[in-house]
Structure formats: structure tokens, C-alpha cells
């Protein structure tokens, strides 16, 4: 039994005992009432809640108020919402009730805003947004060192900023004369990628690729077979000495690029170690220029498409890259398409193998873009091909670029990983630990309710996320626009079956029981004195 019924049973037992000990009708009644009145003060009796046909909700109503109001209104009843509307997450709680809401006058200010919560030092950070305004207004971005950029617009805007130091960085964004919004970004040192490139013969492409990786801060080892018995090894950046194909080296390797025909130059034992490393997360890019059969390191099928190599236009994400580059006269079947030529034939595809990924690449000379002056196109190509294969972190936290993080409002975090673990939450001086099983977090979302303004730290062994939490005065225009959109959608939606009306029970006020207790005590005392 719960504590409340047991408490009342004890009060009843004391009431019976007091009544048995006392003499006289008034004294016995007053003494018996004392334990019951004390119990009523501690746990006031509850009456069934009223079921009504209509209620009103204020725009700033919290979740508990919304739930209680919905439970108090019968299915099909009407709930009137005032102001901008409820928090977008609360509208589903009103299922089965009719909604009345008057759209307020339009406002000038931010409607949407997105920015990355994480950035690498030295890499551009892009901030984008949309404003609602009848006239053009100035949108200004101020950086942590006071640097300022601005634009006049009545619709969309975008800024690009480059972090100059690692750590927790904040930018300020102001629309017109409105209250500025603070945008927090966690700036990290870029990861030091470990890359090995294996060439079956001397050529220009793979050394150029090695220098490109080195320029981006990677540690690169380029091994080129000169003859059947002679192999040349060149190290770029902070590449370690030693055999790059040893088991320990492969375990820390992020990307392996195999030039055309390079796989055939590897001993069988090395190929087996690479396959095992791929299953553990290693990424591989295979350059393909000739028909090939499937193998553990090439889970595709390459068949002849044409007789000779041709130049083609390449399409990434429906955007055609400028300039034609040489592509192999083969058709690669299997995997997910990363890019195509102008005819829609895949030029690069990726396939998952265990925890790793293997990319088949038909572009035989990506340097053709640079030679024709299209350096950005070549960068975009290798970013797609290498980025699709490179080793992924064991787990990491993700938060939407458009999420508003404010005190006492829900924020959704997604954990990308497949391991259970203990998650630590740090808010100011308060630290909590939460046990989340992999079944709860794998590919799903976790909802947190920040309690303090400042940087919120969400830490798991594999990754730490820092998110800036703002107060109610920040992001007001964006929150208002989100509530308006959610309210319009909720009003337009048809009434669907919702939970039956089950209003919360109402507690009786305590003060009558307190007065009765005082009166009973006076009666017992006066009668006892006589």
C-alpha cells in the first residue's frame, strides 16, 4: 500500500483510541477528530475533477498546465488558445479537442535561424536565417572580438564567419533595433586524419591527392610500387614511421586510398588485415578504371561500359560541377550512388562493410578540374568521395542547427552510436549522471530540459557536446514564429480521436481543516480543565 492510505489508516486508529479513552460526548468527539484533522492537513482529501466543455490556455502555459486543461475538457470540447500559441511540442496534447485561436498581428523579427553548434578551428561557419518585415531592415552579426558584418534585407540572409580560437565562442545577431540573439558555437581543433595512399604505379594523381590531404592537416603515407621488388614510401605531415599495414597501424587509420590495380599488389595476409580493419570502421576508396569482380575489398561489380576512357560532366546533389574530367569506361553496380555523370550513370558509389565503408571511384584524373582552373570543383569532389569513406567516430552527440535551446524548454539531442554508456550532464555547479541503454539512444532522440543559463555539457565516453543555453529573453522572435506556425497547423488540422477526459482530482483547501483542528483542540482543553 502507498504511504497516504497507510497514513489515513493510522489516523483512524488513533481517532478510535482517543474516543475510547475520553469520557463525555463532546470531549470524545473532539478528541476523535484531532488525528483526522491532522491527517487532512497533511494530505487533504481530493474530489473528482470537473469535466467541462471549454477551457482557455495562455500562450505561455507550461506542459503541466496544458495536460491538466486537456484532461478537464471532454473529447470534442473546445480549448481556446491566446497569444502566439503554445510551444510546438505541446499541441499533440490537445488531440481530440477543438482548437480556437486568433492569429495575432504580424511582427518584425527573426522567423528562422540556423547555425552549427560545432565548428573546426579555421573552417568557415555559416549562419542563415529568415526575417519577417514589411520593409528592409539591417541584420548585424557581431563576433567575439567585436568584428561586425551586416546586411539589409526583408527576407533571407546569410553570414560566414571563421573561428579564430578554440573553445566556447558566442556571436551576437541583431535584427533592426530588436533584442540581439546570442549564438553559441563550440570550436574544436580539427581532427588529425591518418591517411594511407597505395599506388600500383607512378602517376600524377595520387601524389597530388596526398599533397591535398596534407594541406588540410592530415598525416599521409604514400606508397608507390616502382618495380616488382621496389616500393617508394613518402610521408607527409606528421605521419608515423613504420609499416602502415600492421594491425595496430590499421586500427588507427582513418582512410585508405587504393589506386587502380593497387589491391592486386598487396599480399594476401595484408588484404585480410585490411578487410578486418574495414569491419572495425576503416574507410577505403578504390580507384576503378577496368572491369573487376567482387572481392572482400571491392564489394561491387565493375563491367565494361565503353571501349575507351571519356571526359564527362559530374553531378553532385543535383548540382553539375563545371568542366569535364576523365572517367573510366566501366559501369559500377551496387551500393549507394554518391555522384553521376550527365547521363545519370554512377561515377562514385559507397557500400557499408561492417562498421566501415568502401567507395568505388570512376574518376581517373580529378586533377583535370585544377588544370582547367576549377579548384573548387576538385575540392568538392574529394570532399564527397573521401568524406563518404573516412572512419566515423564510435559515437557522437548531434543537435539540430535550427534548435532553440532555452531554460525550461525541451531540446532534442541525438546520439549516433551503438554502445550503451553513462551520460554526464553538467549545468553550472550541478552534475547528473544518466544511464541510457543503446536501445534507447541508437538512432533515436533524447529530450533534455535545461535548468540554468550558460553552457550545458553532455558527456559520454566517446564524445562531449557543449551547447549554449539561453534565457527567456533570447530567441523570442524565433520562438514566437515557431509557435505561430504550430498554431496555424493545429487549427487547420481536423479533430482526431484523443484520450478520454480524465480530469485531475482537486484537493480541498487546508484552511478549514486548520480552523477545525484549532477548535477541536480548544474544546478538549476546556473540557479537560473542567
Image (cartoon, grey):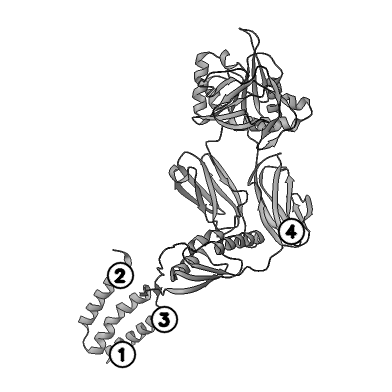
Per the rendering, the mark at residue 175 is 4
Of the numbered discs 1 and 3, the one sitting upstream in the chain is 3
Find the distance from the CA under tag 2 to the CA under tag 4: 59 Å
Which residue is at a point 58% across and 63% down the rendered structure image?
A: 487
Camera-side residue of 459 and 391: 391
Secondary element at image label 2? helix
Find the distance from the CA under tag 1 to the CA under tag 3: 23 Å
Of the numbered discs 2 and 1, the one sitting upstream in the chain is 2
Of the numbered discs 3 and 4, the one sitting upstream in the chain is 4
Task: Please state, as top left, top right, bottom left or bottom right, where the N terminus lies in the image.
Answer: bottom left
Per the rendering, the mark at residue 266 is none
CB within 8 Å, label 2 to label 3: no
Residue 365 visible somewhere in the drawing = no
CB within 8 Å, label 1 to label 3: no
Secondary element at image label 1? helix
Find the distance from the CA under tag 2 to the CA under tag 3: 20 Å
Find the distance from the CA under tag 1 to the CA under tag 4: 73 Å
Task: Check the image and name the residue furthest to the bottom.
Answer: 530
Task: Please state, as top left, top right, bottom left or bottom right, where the C terminus lies in the image.
Answer: bottom left
Q: Which residue is tagged 1?
A: 526
Q: Which residue is tagged 3?
A: 511
Amino acid at each position: 500500500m502507498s504511504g497516504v492510505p497507510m497514513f489515513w489508516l493510522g489516523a483512524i486508529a488513533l481517532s478510535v483510541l482517543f474516543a475510547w479513552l475520553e469520557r463525555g460526548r463532546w470531549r470524545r468527539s473532539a478528541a476523535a477528530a484531532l488525528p483526522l484533522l491532522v491527517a487532512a492537513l497533511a494530505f487533504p482529501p481530493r474530489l473528482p475533477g470537473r469535466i467541462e466543455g471549454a477551457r482557455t490556455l495562455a500562450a505561455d502555459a507550461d506542459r503541466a498546465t496544458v495536460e491538466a486543461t486537456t484532461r478537464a475538457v471532454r473529447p470534442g470540447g473546445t480549448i481556446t488558445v491566446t497569444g502566439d500559441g503554445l510551444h510546438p511540442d505541446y499541441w499533440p496534447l490537445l488531440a481530440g479537442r477543438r482548437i480556437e485561436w486568433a492569429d495575432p498581428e504580424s511582427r518584425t523579427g527573426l522567423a528562422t535561424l540556423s547555425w552549427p553548434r560545432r565548428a573546426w578551428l579555421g573552417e568557415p561557419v555559416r549562419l542563415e536565417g529568415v526575417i519577417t518585415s514589411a520593409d528592409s531592415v539591417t541584420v548585424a552579426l557581431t563576433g567575439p572580438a567585436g568584428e561586425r558584418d551586416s546586411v539589409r534585407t526583408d527576407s533571407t540572409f546569410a553570414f560566414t564567419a571563421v573561428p579564430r580560437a578554440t573553445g566556447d565562442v558566442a556571436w551576437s545577431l541583431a535584427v533592426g533595433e530588436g533584442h540581439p540573439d546570442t549564438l553559441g558555437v563550440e570550436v574544436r581543433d580539427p581532427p588529425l586524419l591518418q591517411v594511407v595512399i597505395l599506388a600500383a604505379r607512378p602517376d600524377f594523381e595520387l601524389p597530388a591527392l596526398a599533397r591535398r590531404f596534407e594541406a588540410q592537416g592530415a598525416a599521409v603515407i604514400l606508397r608507390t610500387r616502382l618495380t616488382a621488388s621496389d616500393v617508394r614510401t613518402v610521408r607527409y605531415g606528421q605521419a608515423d614511421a613504420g609499416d602502415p599495414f600492421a594491425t595496430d597501424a590499421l586500427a588507427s587509420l582513418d582512410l585508405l586510398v587504393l589506386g587502380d590495380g593497387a589491391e592486386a599488389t598487396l599480399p594476401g595476409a595484408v588484404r585480410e588485415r585490411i578487410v578486418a580493419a574495414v569491419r572495425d570502421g576503416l574507410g577505403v576508396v578504390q580507384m576503378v578504371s577496368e572491369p573487376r569482380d567482387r572481392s572482400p575489398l571491392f564489394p561491387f561489380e565493375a563491367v565494361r561500359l565503353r571501349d575507351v576512357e571519356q571526359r564527362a560532366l559530374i553531378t553532385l546533389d543535383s548540382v553539375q560541377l563545371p568542366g569535364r574530367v576523365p572517367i573510366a569506361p566501366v559501369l559500377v553496380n551496387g551500393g549507394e550512388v554518391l555522384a553521376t555523370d550527365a547521363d545519370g550513370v554512377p561515377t562514385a558509389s559507397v557500400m557499408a562493410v561492417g562498421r566501415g565503408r568502401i567507395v568505388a571511384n570512376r574518376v581517373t584524373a580529378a586533377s583535370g578540374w585544377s588544370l582547367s582552373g576549377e579548384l573548387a570543383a576538385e575540392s568538392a569532389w574529394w570532399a564527397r568521395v573521401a568524406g563518404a569513406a573516412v572512419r566515423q567516430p564510435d559515437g557522437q552527440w548531434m543537435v539540430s542547427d535550427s534548435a532553440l535551446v532555452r531554460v525550461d524548454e525541451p531540446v532534442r539531442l541525438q546520439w549516433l552510436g551503438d554502445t550503451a554508456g553513462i551520460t554526464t550532464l553538467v549545468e553550472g555547479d550541478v552534475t547528473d549522471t544518466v544511464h541510457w541503454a543503446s536501445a534507447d539512444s541508437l538512432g533515436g532522440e533524447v529530450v533534455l530540459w535545461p535548468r540554468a543559463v550558460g553552457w550545458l555539457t553532455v558527456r559520454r565516453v566517446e564524445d562531449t557536446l557543449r551547447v549554449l543555453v539561453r534565457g527567456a529573453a533570447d530567441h523570442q522572435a524565433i520562438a514566437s514564429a515557431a509557435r505561430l506556425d504550430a498554431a496555424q497547423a493545429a487549427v487547420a488540422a481536423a479533430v482526431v480521436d484523443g484520450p478520454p477526459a480524465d480530469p485531475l482530482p482537486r484537493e480541498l483547501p487546508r484552511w478549514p481543516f486548520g480552523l477545525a483542528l484549532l477548535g477541536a483542540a480548544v474544546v478538549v482543553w476546556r473540557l479537560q480543565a473542567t
